[in-house]
């Protein structure tokens, strides 16, 4: 299953589906053809309730049958940023540059279809552009708790900090978040 997650290829789940349920994929594709007019939620529920599929396997089969053969939407940060306004693109690039210049050992990867920084297999920091703001996400929930006084004036959610699309990047704040997330 790790290969399915890392590749994004929904068909990578198919061998495990065949092993677990004892039927070839041709059978499951025929089942999906019969369910073609139903909603995503109805299709997933049917596979889970009637056939004992896990959520991951049901999602892979349903999405594949709907024409989405990969969970990966973006190959890289440029692809991710292409749909956002220039100001958001510039802010995200500055955020990533500020962190990358101080922590060159962190790898910039696309995970969950978002730009993420990780050290080895440990995710350290991620971000997401939303309609009218950017969410900053240190991957350790305690970071935001520990930094609460420093984050006064920002909208702090359970696991993220909201900054405007045209944020004047606070390098010290970013460095502190990453330093704390690394531990």
Image: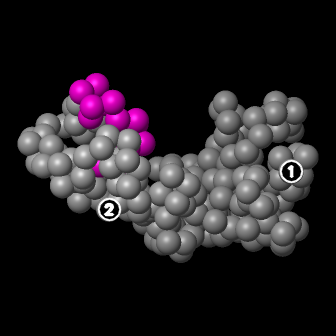
44 horizontally vs 20: left or right: left
38 horizontally vs 5: left or right: left
**x 13%, y 40%: residue:** 35
The part of the chain drawn in magenta is: 47-61
| Of the pair 182 and 78, the residue shown nearer to us | 182
Q: How far is mark 2 from mark 1, CA to CA?
A: 35 Å
Residue 4 belongs to magenta span: no
Q: Is residue 53 above or below residue 105?
A: above
Residue 51, how many percent across, how many down? 27, 31
**x 24%, y 27%: residue:** 50
Q: Is residue 105 above or below residue 34?
A: below
Whether residue 151 is visible: no
| Of the pair 115 and 147, the residue shown nearer to us | 115
Give the residue pinned by disc 2: 69
Mark before the other along the chain sequence, 2 or 1:
2
| Of the pair 133 and 58, the residue shown nearer to us | 58
């Amino acid at each position: 299953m790790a290969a399915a997650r890392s590749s994004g290829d929904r068909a990578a789940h198919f061998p495990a589906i065949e092993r677990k349920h004892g039927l070839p994929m041709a059978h499951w594709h025929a089942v999906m053809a019969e369910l073609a007019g139903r909603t995503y939620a109805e299709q997933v529920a049917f596979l889970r309730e009637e056939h004992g599929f896990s959520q991951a396997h049901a999602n892979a089969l349903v999405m594949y049958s709907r024409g989405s053969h990969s969970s990966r939407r973006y190959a890289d940060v440029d692809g991710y940023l292409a749909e956002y306004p220039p100001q958001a693109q510039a802010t995200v690039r500055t955020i990533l540059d500020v962190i990358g210049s101080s922590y060159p050992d962190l790898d910039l990867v696309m995970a969950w279809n978002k730009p993420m920084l990780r050290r080895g297999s440990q995710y350290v920091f991620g971000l997401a552009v939303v309609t009218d703001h950017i969410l900053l996400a240190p991957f350790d929930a305690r970071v935001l708790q520990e930094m609460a006084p420093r984050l006064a004036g920002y909208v702090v959610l359970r696991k993220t900090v909201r900054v405007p699309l045209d944020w004047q990047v606070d390098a010290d704040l970013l460095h502190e978040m990453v330093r704390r997330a690394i531990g």
